[in-house]
Each structure stands twice: as structure tokens, then as C-alpha cells.
Image (cartoon, rainbow, N blue to C red):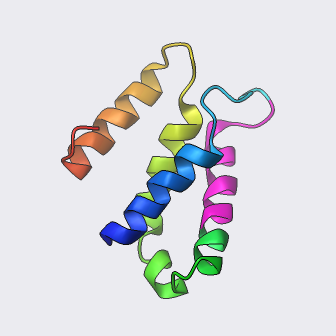
């Protein structure tokens, strides 16, 4: 993932996905897919090319899913997902 696109994705996730936002209405997976589509639509409007963003789709969905599944309560699935992402990105966050 290009660093510029990755930084933009991280900022977008922080600004648009609130932790613990009512998961009873839709599942985490459905919400993550919906928000990922919104993210990619906005990526085009801020100047990223479709090909530049589409090649990163597989790496962005887990980031969005981790943010969506984050809640104020301890969620073992979110913990495991975040651990996998930290290991994959090798940044420890």
C-alpha cells in the first residue's frame, strides 16, 4: 500500500468510524463492507486513481473491520484482528 494512501485511509477511519457504534443494527462485516465502499468512493474524489485504490482493497477491508468491531467492551475477535493487522503491517499499532 502506498504510504500516502495508507495515511489517508488511517485518517479516514479515525474520522468516520466511531468505536462501539451500535453493532445491533448490522453485523460488523456488513458495516465494514459498506464503509469500505464509502471510503473508496471518497478516495476517488480526493484524487486517488481507481486503480491505485482498488489494488489495496484487500488490505483496507481488515483495517475498516478492526475499527468497526472496536467497542468499549473487550472484544476478543477485535483483539485478534488488531493483533494480526499489527503483525502484518509490522508497525505494532
78, above or below 1, in the image:
above
Picture quarter with the N terminus:
bottom left
What residue range appears in magenta? 25-39
Coordinates of residue 26 in the picture (x, y in percent): 76, 37
User: Is residue 88 on the magenta stretch?
Assistant: no
In the picture, measured across the screen, residue 76 lies left or right of residue 85, that is right
Determine the image quadrant of residue 6: bottom left
Coordinates of residue 92 in the picture (x, y in percent): 22, 38
In the picture, measured across the screen, residue 21 lies left or right of residue 68, that is right
66, above or below 45, in the image:
above
Coordinates of residue 4 in the picture (x, y in percent): 37, 70
At a point 42% along the width and 77% down the height, the residue shown is 55
Residue 52 or residue 59, whichever sits in front = 52
Picture quarter with the C terminus:
top left
In the picture, measured across the screen, residue 23 lies left or right of residue 57, that is right
Residue 53 or residue 10, whichever sits in front = 10
At a point 44% along the width and 82% down the height, the residue shown is 52
At a point 59% along the width and 38% down the height, the residue shown is 68
Magenta portion: prevailing SS class: helix
Determine the image quadrant of residue 56: bottom left
2, above or below 10, in the image:
below
User: Is residue 32 on the magenta stretch?
Assistant: yes
Which residue appears farthest toward the left when viewing the image?
90
Amino acid at each position: 500500500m502506498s504510504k500516502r494512501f495508507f495515511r489517508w485511509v488511517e485518517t479516514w477511519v479515525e474520522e468516520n468510524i466511531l468505536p462501539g457504534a451500535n453493532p445491533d443494527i448490522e453485523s460488523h462485516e456488513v458495516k465494514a463492507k459498506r464503509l469500505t465502499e464509502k471510503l473508496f468512493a471518497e478516495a476517488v474524489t480526493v484524487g486517488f486513481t481507481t486503480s491505485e485504490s482498488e489494488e489495496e482493497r484487500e488490505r483496507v477491508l481488515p483495517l475498516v473491520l478492526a475499527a468497526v468491531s472496536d467497542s468499549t467492551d473487550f472484544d476478543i475477535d477485535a483483539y485478534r484482528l488488531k493483533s494480526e493487522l499489527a503483525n502484518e503491517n509490522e508497525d505494532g499499532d
